[in-house]
Amino acid sequence: MGYALSVKTDDAALLTALREATDSNSAAANEFVRKHQKFVYSTALRYLKSSDDAYDAVQDVFIKALKSIHNFRGDSSITTWLYRITINVCSGMKRKEKVRQFVGLDIVEELEPDRGVTPAQTTENNDFKARFDALLEQLPAKQRETFMMRYYDELSYEEISKILGTSVGGLKANYFQAVKKLAHLLKEQQP
Amino acid sequence: MIPTISTNDLSFSDKPLPLLSHEETEHLLPDYAFGKLTDVETKQFENALLQYPELAHDLEVIQHSFVFVSENTIALDRAQTQRLKNLTVHIQQRIQSANERRTKFLGFFRVMVPVCTVAAAVLVLAVPNRVSDYLFNRTGTENALTIHPEDVKDLTNGDDAAVAQSLKETDVLFNTGAATLDVSASEDLAAEKIAAQAAKRMLPKETLAVVAMNTSAFQDYFDDSSASDAMTDADATAVALAMSRKNGIN
């Protein structure tokens, strides 16, 4: 999950390659998608609560982004830009009632069976995830969103600040409070 | 993944770092717990933590509680990687199919635009009078010269106040036109014709409708503006007479 921290170093080169590419089916386009797909997917999943809908949304987001890459002025980071597109796409999907379920914070993404992981472990992971999502619901919205972006998406405070419109200092305080509260809730749940 | 720390095992660099405040230490705590700090920040944090034992306790709880969260996150990450492995292929397929649809759409217009242009040109060349009448007379200004029978019918059959007012105003305008005609007209038939045509151009549609109603013989002239150009001298005189009669000039 360390992709977000490495993006910034070669963003400019990738943007140049994308703008110079005459075909959207270019190596640069594929690299662009691979580099940001997890962030876009996890953001869409948080809003849509359905892995299938999130997957559709991710495709829409990248198609829009690749189409309008020439209009990207670089005022914000690519991550911030993609986040805004993702939220717009997801909002559109919700409006059109394409989404079957979006009430609550439960992310219904189930961990698929993985090689090297026993079915029992997969079940245990899914159970834990459901419980953890329920704990996340207990956080105030701002703390929850900050935690998601910082912990799961690994965005910098500056990027989150641009997205949420909160000061970096405020975000750090939110993150600390969110982590502390979750830790205590987790501790209470332990046998 | 998560670094562990013992307060008895803190190392310090030779160069003293500025001591962090309680708030600053709090802000760094989660990133320290999840191994996201730089070396310098780590040293600063560890240095400051000695001053704040309550934060050291929070750190211990967080590190212990998040062990399973971290493992679960790795599993989730693996699942997402699996889910997204064909994403680029699907995106390229959708872009390609969208391009194909656009190509078909543009292809359709590439054929239809020339066909429609040729058809329009043929229409203009084949029936120039009809087209020019339609374009320049029928859809002209409010004071259109062409009067159609249905316009007259609509005007005279109406019984609401707006129509009555329009007719009243029409009469005034008609009288004005007739007076002009009276001044302009002379014994000369050519001058009468010019005056009649001038009156026709000057008077609004409603006035002409009244004229057309009262003098059905001239209906054709008002139905087809091009006919007014070919107005005979006798008809022009009759129009002038009709207007003069209406105005009591006779």
Image (spheres, rainbow, N blue to C red):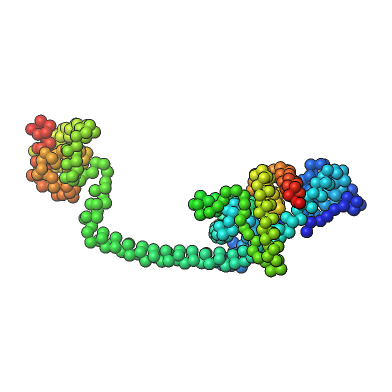
Residue A63 pos. (x, y %): 55, 60
In the visual, does B44 lie left or right of B163? right
Which residue is rendered at x = 59% and y = 61% of the image? Answer: A19
Between residue B230 and residue B185, name the one nearer to us. B230
Which residue is rendered at x = 56% and y = 64% of the image? Answer: B91
Q: Is residue B158 visible?
A: yes
What is the quadrant of residue B153 in the picture? top left
Between residue A107 and residue A75, name the one nearer to us. A107
Residue A49 pos. (x, y %): 59, 54
Image quarter where the N terminus of chain B lies is bottom right
Between residue A37 and residue A17, name the one nearer to us. A37
Which residue is rendered at x = 26% and y = 46% of the image? Answer: B140
Q: Is residue A30 above or below residue B158?
A: below
Q: Is residue A49 above or below residue A34?
A: above
Q: How many numbered callouts?
A: 0
View extreme (front): residue: A191
In the visual, does A111 lie left or right of B178? right
Q: Is residue A15 visible?
A: no
What is the quadrant of residue B52 in the picture? top right
Between residue A178 and residue B72, name the one nearer to us. B72
Residue B152 pos. (x, y %): 17, 41
Image quarter where the C terminus of chain B lies is top left
Residue B184 pos. (x, y %): 15, 36
Q: Is residue B142 above or below residue A5?
A: above
Which residue is rendered at x = 14% and y = 41% of the image? Answer: B212
